[in-house]
């Protein structure tokens, strides 16, 4: 498996289908081969992956209607989506996993299915007042807690972008603009990143990688709104510096033996492609980095045709029902690594490979 060929696409879709539970309603998926219970996160990743390969058109009208209704059934009166089988403290408080993060993925999944939430995203109404947006922005940790902050800001801002563009909530545009203006003001002009230049723990390479991971969640907000982020050339310098000898983009304390995750890889692949669309700076270096990254990402797919989050490492994605053992494929990394390949092919070959992107905010738009 060395290219995202038609065979590769069919294999990934086979893995997706193997995770689907039989019986109504259509659209219920488990997270990994070792799991048995359906979770809403997995249903979202199935929709996103199948859309990426242009395969959702194969749904019957009945399957489509059941899937949409199944997803919509998880929405509460405040507009947020909650899956009771994974309810826990982290779901309430987390940013890289939990209800707001899940809602972001549900909104993308509904776009793939040509549907919308049944209710308004009423939890966003606190952002109607400009002073509330300013207070909210200042309340985040813009230091070494950047990773937590960047996920949280993305969750809220994507929901605001969606409410504006898909639900007619025009007031949300002001909040989005205020968030992007704040990011402009707090961006480091020497690196194009956010957060302090040095960390109190870990290597310099590891902290640079962490800053790039955090910045990715901000950059997609800019690009969806067709707004150029600050200092594109410095961004490319920063991102290129995070690539390791295996072709991935993760650094550990021992930088000689890196093993990057699905998140670390897409968090560098995506900006390399998007920023190279707006500047010719270091174009040859970017292309070489993408070629190396492509081989590495493909190597994270298994014989069962799914992908791992991180090689040789077990991974619990927020809850035991979203656990995959070392070497075991999971729905989240399969989607994210397939999306990484789609973005890579967009950067390397234009539209020749036939991937299908979204028109809505989040991660999968082009």
Image (cartoon, rainbow, N blue to C red):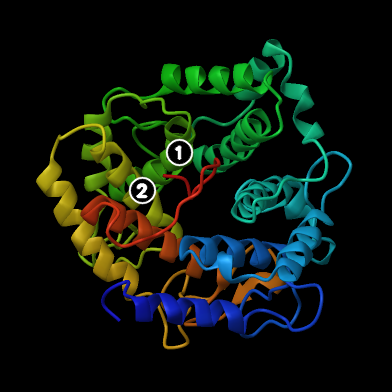
Residue named by callout 1? 220
Q: Is residue 12 above or below residue 78?
A: below
Quadrant of the rendered image containing residue 158: top right
Across and down, in percent, residue 128 comes to 73, 18
Quarter of the figure that contains the N terminus: bottom left
Task: Tell me the element at label 2.
Answer: helix
- Circle on res. 270: 2
Residue at image location 41% in from the left, 75% down from the top: 9
Residue at image location 66% in from the left, 47% down from the top: 107
Q: Is residue 196 above or below residue 80?
A: above
Residue at image location 80% in from the left, 63% down from the top: 70
Crowd rating for badge 2 (residues with CA inside 10 Å; few <14, some 14–19, many 20+): many
- Residue sitting at the far top: 131
Across and down, in percent, residue 77 comes to 89, 41
Quadrant of the rendered image containing residue 243: bottom left
The span from disc 2 to disc 1 (Cα, nearest Å) is 9 Å
- Residue sitting at the far left: 284
Residue contact at pointers 2 and 1, CB within 8 angstroms: yes
Across and down, in percent, residue 85 comes to 82, 67
Sequence order check, earlier mark of 2 and 1: 1
Tally the numbered discs.
Answer: 2
Across and down, in percent, residue 73 comes to 84, 57
- Residue sitting at the far bottom: 303
Quarter of the figure that contains the C terminus: top left
In this view, the residue in front, 88 or 279, is 279
Q: Is residue 158 above or below residue 164?
A: below
Residue 326 visible in the picture: yes
Task: Tell me the element at label 1.
Answer: helix
Residue at image location 35% in from the left, 54% down from the top: 343
| Left or right of 209 on screen, residue 329 | right
Crowd rating for badge 1 (residues with CA inside 10 Å; few <14, some 14–19, many 20+): many
């Amino acid at each position: 498996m060395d290219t995202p060929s038609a065979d590769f696409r069919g294999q990934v879709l086979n893995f997706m289908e193997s995770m689907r539970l039989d019986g109504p309603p259509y659209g219920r998926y488990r997270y990994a081969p070792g799991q048995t219970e359906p979770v809403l996160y997995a249903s979202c990743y199935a929709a996103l992956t199948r859309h990426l390969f242009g395969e959702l058109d194969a749904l019957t009208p009945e399957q489509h209607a059941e899937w949409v209704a199944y997803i919509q059934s998880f929405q509460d009166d405040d507009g947020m989506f909650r899956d009771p089988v994974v309810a826990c403290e982290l779901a309430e408080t987390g940013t890289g996993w939990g209800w707001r993060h899940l809602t972001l993925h549900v909104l993308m999944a509904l776009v793939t299915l040509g549907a919308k939430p049944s209710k308004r995203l009423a939890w966003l109404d606190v952002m109607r007042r400009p002073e509330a947006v300013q207070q909210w922005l200042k309340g985040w940790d813009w230091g070494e807690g950047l990773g937590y902050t960047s996920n949280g800001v993305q969750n809220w801002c994507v929901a605001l972008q969606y409410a504006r563009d898909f639900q007619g909530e025009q007031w949300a545009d002001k909040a989005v603009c205020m968030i992007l203006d704040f990011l402009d003001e707090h961006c480091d002009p020497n690196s194009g990143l956010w957060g302090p230049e040095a960390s109190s723990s870990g290597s310099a390479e590891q902290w640079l990688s962490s800053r790039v991971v955090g910045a990715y969640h901000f950059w997609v907000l800019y690009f969806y709104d067709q707004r150029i982020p600050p200092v594109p050339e410095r961004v490319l310098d920063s991102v290129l510096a995070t690539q390791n000898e295996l072709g991935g983009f993760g650094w550990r304390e021992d930088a000689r033996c890196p093993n990057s995750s699905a998140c670390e890889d897409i968090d560098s692949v995506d900006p390399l492609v998007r920023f190279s669309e707006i500047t010719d700076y270091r174009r040859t270096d970017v292309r070489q980095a993408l070629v190396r990254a492509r081989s590495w990402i493909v190597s994270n797919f298994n014989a069962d045709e799914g992908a791992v989050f991180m090689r040789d490492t077990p991974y619990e994605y927020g809850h035991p029902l979203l656990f995959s053992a070392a070497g075991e494929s999971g729905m989240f990394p399969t989607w994210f690594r397939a999306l990484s390949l789609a973005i890579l092919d967009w950067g390397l070959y234009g539209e020749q490979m036939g991937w299908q992107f979204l028109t809505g905010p989040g991660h999968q738009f082009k």
